[in-house]
Each structure stands twice: as structure tokens, then as C-alpha cells.
Image (spheres, rainbow, N blue to C red):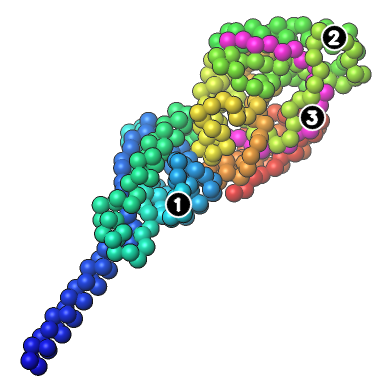
Amino acid sequence: MGAIGKYAAIAVGVLAVTGIGGYVALPSAASKSQSISVPRPSAAVFARLSSTPANTQVAPGVTVKRVVSAENNVVVEEISFADGGSGRATYTVRPDGDEATHVDVKIERNLGANPVDRVQGLSGAPVASAAAVFFPAVTTDLNALPNASFAGLAYQVVQAPPQPFFYVQKCTTTEPDSIIAIIGEAQASLPGAMRQQHLQPIGHLIAVEPRVVPNQYCFQVGFPFSGPTPRATLYEVGQTPSGTLLHMHYTGTEQDVVPQVYDRMDALLAAAHLDDPTTPADDWATFETYNDDPTQPGGSRDREIYYVTKGDISRLAAIAPPQTVAPPAAPAAAVTTTTTEEPATTVPAATTTETTTTP
């Protein structure tokens, strides 16, 4: 009997050790993985994923608490679930040809000490319902990015105070010739109207696009001015855009300005989560200052383009740092110049001061 008891004790011990070993071998997190292909530049995809703001709901019931790391083309996020559970999302990004990106996506949910939950974790069941909405949401978000590259985009961050602005408002189609035509009409009619009001134009003609209208461009075209407050007039009086501006110098035709400047800056803003690429409702106001004749064939060949900022623009600097270049002196204003890498003309303001944004 003593021998039997001894062997029984040994057997119980072996089973206990086996059970403990099996429990330890069970996963501490349930996971699901999926690969997606996105017809967008890999730099934009990686930037979009790595710059996700804290507490962003990516999909119903799945919220990014913070980005844990973003390096070597791998982004790791700490996520939470609607029921209070926690986990991780991991994205491995690589180019898939010249203009497409392959992304391996994994979503994980941390499991507790319950052996049943850990056994279910082998199949990924505890995270399956979240994965069913998470993967499509990530795919939709990345596919909504503008199909443009911001690589090499040169911009500066400048400050400009408001100035009195005498202008006419016109809407047109998006055709370059139509845009050139309405700019030309304003340039021809405004100086005479300003003389009648005893107003002195300051600097160059400006075209402000304060809002985005589907299939149309609506501009406020006019001049900053000095002089008495205008009397009743067929034209309008307001203020030039002011505050913190993103500035780009452009030399080219009206035909190419959208792909060369606007599409690239919009891609950067979307990658930094400063613009929702699925809607024009939150687009930033923009304006242009023409340094030459905007009615010549092909439109202005030398212009300054500005975005009126909103949101935390340090996100832009983290992805694509601005140049530390101040505009040189121009007839429109007195300007302080610092380092000069690439010349650019002043914003339409009495004084402009260059600022550098750091991450």
C-alpha cells in the first residue's frame, strides 16, 4: 500500500506540473492578423499611422490610447476596447511598387488569468468581433489619403497680421482658363474702383479661397489697402487672412499648381491627422499672392501660396520639418530676413516674422 501511495503521489505531481506547463504555454493575448494593399505612397501611410492622436476611435469599440513606437516601418499602438479591455495594434509597412503600400496589420487583446479565456485565445476568438470592424476601418482610412507624395515639399511657417482688404467675390469651375479669366476681371476692375474710394493698394493682387465648394472654386480677389473706410460700394471690404500661415513659393502654370502644391500639402495635412481626407468640410482656407501678371498665358508664373493654419502644426514638423527661411524684402512690406536657402516673397502684411516649428 505504501508503494501504491508513493506512485499515486508521483502521478499527481506529474499531472500538476504538466497542467502548469500547459497553462504557461497558453497565449496571454488573443490576436487576429490581416494584410492590406493601399494604392498610396508608403511614406504617407506610415506617417498617417504613426501620428494617430491619443484617444482616437479607429473603429466602433476600438480606440487608440497612444502610439507606443514608430520606427523601422513598424508602428505599435496601445488600444482599448469598449468593454474596458486593452491590447495592441501593430502595423508593418513596406512599399508595394512605386505608388502602393503593403501593410500587415495585427490586433491583439490582452487576456486575464482565466484558463478558459486563454484556451479561446488560441483561435483569436476573444478579439474576433473587434477585428471584424477594425480591419475594414483601417483599410478605408488609408485608402482615403490623397494620392500624392509630400516628399520634398518645401514650406515655411510665417506670421502675418490682418490688413484691410478690398475685394470682389467670384466663383468659377476648376478649369485653369476659367480661373485665369476671373482673376483677370478682378485685376482690371479693382484699381479704378479703389481710386474712386481714395484707397491705395498695398502690394500684389491676392486671391483667397475661404471655403471649398464641390466642383467649384470660390475666390475673394482683391488688394490690401490703406486709406479711409470705403463708402457703399459694389465691392466688398474685409481683412486679409492672418495668424500662423504655411507658405510655399511656386513658379509654374495654373495647370500644374494643384498637383505640384495643393495635392502635396493636402497629403501632408492628412498624414498628420490635421485634415479629414474624406470630406472638404474641414479644409484649411488658402490664398495666393501674385508676383507677376496672373492673366498671361498659363496664368501667374511666380506666386506665393499660403494655408491658414488650424490645429497642432507640430505634427507637420514631426513628419516633414519646415524650412527656416524668411521672405526677402518686397514692395508690400518691410521684412526681416534670417537664413536664406530658397527665396520667397512676403505675405500680404505690414510685417512678417519667420517662426520655426519643432516636434
Q: Quadrant of residue 227?
A: top right
Determine if the magenta segment contains residue 178: no
Quick one: SS at disc 2?
A: loop
Q: Nearer the viewer, residue 295 or 182?
A: 182
Of tags 3 and 2, the one toward the viewer is: 2
Magenta region, residue range:
153-173
Looking at the image, which residue is at 76% across and 25% down? 240
Answer with mark 3 or mark 2, whichever residue precedes in sequence: 3
Of tags 1 and 3, the one toward the viewer is: 1
Left or right? Give the position of 139 relative to 237. Answer: left
Left or right? Give the position of 146 relative to 92. Answer: right
The residue to which callout 2 is attached is 233
The residue to which callout 3 is attached is 162
Quick one: SS at disc 1?
A: loop
Looking at the image, which residue is at 9% across and 93% down? 2
x then y, percent, for residue 24: 27, 68
The residue to which callout 1 is attached is 83
Answer with mark 1 or mark 3, whichever residue precedes in sequence: 1
Find out whether the residues at labels 2 and 1 contact each other: C-beta distance under 8 Å.
Answer: no
Badge 3 crowding class, 10 Å Cα cut-off, few under 14, some 14 to 19, many 20 or more, is some
Q: Quadrant of residue 354?
A: top right
